[in-house]
Amino acid sequence: MFTFQNVGFSNTVGTTKYLSCADCEAGPIGYHDLNSRISYVALDRVSHTN
């Protein structure tokens, strides 16, 4: 269903679930729209490292 690693989802608020970091619980880093089933992530809140 979801293709994220280490992302937590909040309880549903209306038709939205807020995304947070599952490791450090920082958030919100974005949200998931239940109607469109699309997740939006704020790029300035995340980073990718190898």
Image (tube, grey):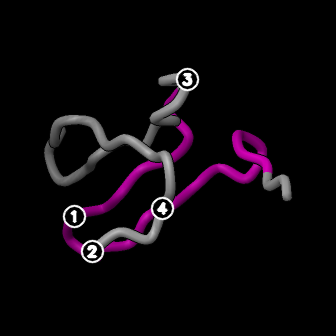
- Is 34 situated left or right of 42 in this image? left
- Is 21 situated left or right of 13 in this image? right
Task: Please report whichever mark, 3 or 1, sits nearer to the chain's N-terminal start.
Answer: 3
The location of residue 24, given as percent across then percent down, is 55, 23
Task: Please report whichever mark, 4 or 3, sits nearer to the chain's N-terminal start.
Answer: 4
Q: CA–CA distance between discs 4 and 2?
A: 9 Å
Task: Please report whichever mark, 4 or 1, sits nearer to the chain's N-terminal start.
Answer: 4
Q: Nearer the viewer, residue 50 or 12?
A: 50
Image marks 1 and 2: residues in contact by CB distance under 8 Å: no
Q: Which of 35 and 19 is in front in this view?
A: 19
Highlighted range, magenta: 27-47
Quadrant containing the C terminus is: bottom right
Determine which quarter of the picture holds residue 46. top right
Q: Which mark is residue 34?
A: 1
The residue singled out by tag 2 in the image is 1
Say which amino acid is labelled 1: Leu
Q: CA–CA distance between discs 3 and 2?
A: 23 Å
Identify the element where label 3 is drawn. loop
Q: CA–CA distance between discs 1 and 2?
A: 12 Å
5, above or below 25, in the image = below
Q: CA–CA distance between discs 3 and 1?
A: 24 Å
Q: Residue 3 carries which label?
A: none
The residue singled out by tag 4 in the image is 4
Identify the element where label 2 is drawn. loop
The location of residue 36, given as percent across then percent down, is 28, 76
Say which amino acid is labelled 2: Met
Q: Does the magenta stretch include residue 28?
A: yes
Q: Nearer the viewer, residue 49 or 18?
A: 49
The residue singled out by tag 3 in the image is 24
Q: Is residue 32 magenta?
A: yes
